Image (tube, grey):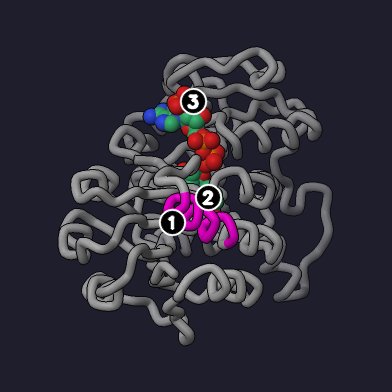
Amino acid sequence: MKKILITRKLIKDSEDKAAKTFNSLFNTNDELYSQSKVVKMSQGCDGILTSLTDKMDKETIKKLPDTIKIISNFAVGFGNIDLNAAKEKGIAVTNTPDVLSDATAEIGILLILGACRRASEGIQSAKEGGWKWSADYLIGKQLTGTRLGILGMGRIGQKIAKIAKSLGMLIHYHNRSKLSEDKENGATYHNNIKSLFSASDVLSICCPATKETENMINKETVEYFPKGAVITNVARGDIIDDEALIDALNRRKIYAAGLDVYKNEPNLNPGYLKIKSAFILPHLGSATKDTRIAMANLAIDNIDEFFNTGNCVNKVN
Ligand code: NAP
């Protein structure tokens, strides 16, 4: 039986599955392991089931024992793992695509609705009491007829597009490659971000965090948007230069932001907390019971497949 370090506590059903499949080292207190603790705990193990809170950078990967052959990430994103360093050390890295797309798209839509319809201010007023209805009280932006730009029209982006379309939004998108017509489903392709941002009354960021996408929303690109646009991010915090977005929100160039993910989580830039029009969530994208079980089960199956076949369909390096 292969020995696997599981760095974070999983939902019980998944831990039961892991216990049947491997000699599993569980993190019963769900302690946030330091990088050196991951290295120490993985001695004698064949693989590690990591979460996005584990920073598997070059230095950490170099120090892993040679027995480690796979890092199975409990997420579709893998910006927390240095893929090249893993490859150099002969370690396969896998992720959990598809099973979390519906849940994450739901949060993507919540961000759009919450930011456009001033949900943060509304919730606060409702809790404080004493609010008075009037014809112009907390009026927000209606989605019907509004252009939604999707940066990264992949699995999650396409699901957001489908729901947004049913709400009457007009879909625009940018990927490095244009999609086939059936995947586009009537959306308008832009072959560069300047063109997409200029056509976005609302933006939904759905692309991975990579060297190319890091700080794609910055001081310069924020000016491409129409005045009063809304920016939402369900992907990764690294894609936004926070100071540039906060400044644009403060001067009302950008009307509102809807954010689920941040640089340096959970310590988000305090500037967001002072902005009434920021609708912020604590990285809830895939947080439903069914989805978290499906993700963990897939992360376990990925390890099993890798050791049984020498490969894995969800290998990303
Ligand atoms: P996906 O299917 O791989 O889609 C990513 C899309 O981004 C693709 O259409 C890709 O198209 C595009 N893209 C990649 N690099 C780009 C670039 N440099 N410029 C423009 N577009 C680019 O991934 P997914 O499953 O939809 O997941 C997307 C991301 O969501 C993940 O990477 C993860 O970080 C994030 N996520 C967040 C949560 C959460 O809890 N909030 C949950 C799940 C996922 P091209 O290759 O043609 O460019």
Gap in angstroms between the C-alphas marked 3 and 2: 29 Å
Q: Dividing the picture into quarters, in which one does residue 281 lie?
A: bottom right
Q: Nearer the viewer, mark 1 or mark 3?
A: 1
Q: On the image, numbered disc 1 is attached to which residue?
A: 73
Instruction: Name the quarter where the C terminus is drawn.
Output: top left
Q: Which residues are magenta?
A: 297-308
* Dot 3 beta carbon under 8 Å from ligand 1: no
Q: Answer left or right for 310 relative to 137.
A: left
Q: Is residue 234 above or below residue 294?
A: above
Q: Is residue 197 above or below residue 155?
A: above
Q: On the image, numbered disc 2 is attached to which residue?
A: 96
Q: Is residue 178 on the magenta stretch? A: no
Q: Earlier in the sequence, mark 1 or mark 3?
A: 1
Q: Earlier in the sequence, mark 2 or mark 1?
A: 1
- What secondary structure prevails in the magenta region? helix
Q: Nearer the viewer, residue 105 or 61?
A: 61
Q: Nearer the viewer, residue 84 or 270?
A: 84
Gap in angstroms between the C-alphas marked 1 and 3: 32 Å
Gap in angstroms between the C-alphas marked 2 and 1: 7 Å
Amino acid type shown at disc 3: Phe
Amino acid type shown at disc 2: Thr
Q: On the image, numbered disc 3 is attached to which residue?
A: 197
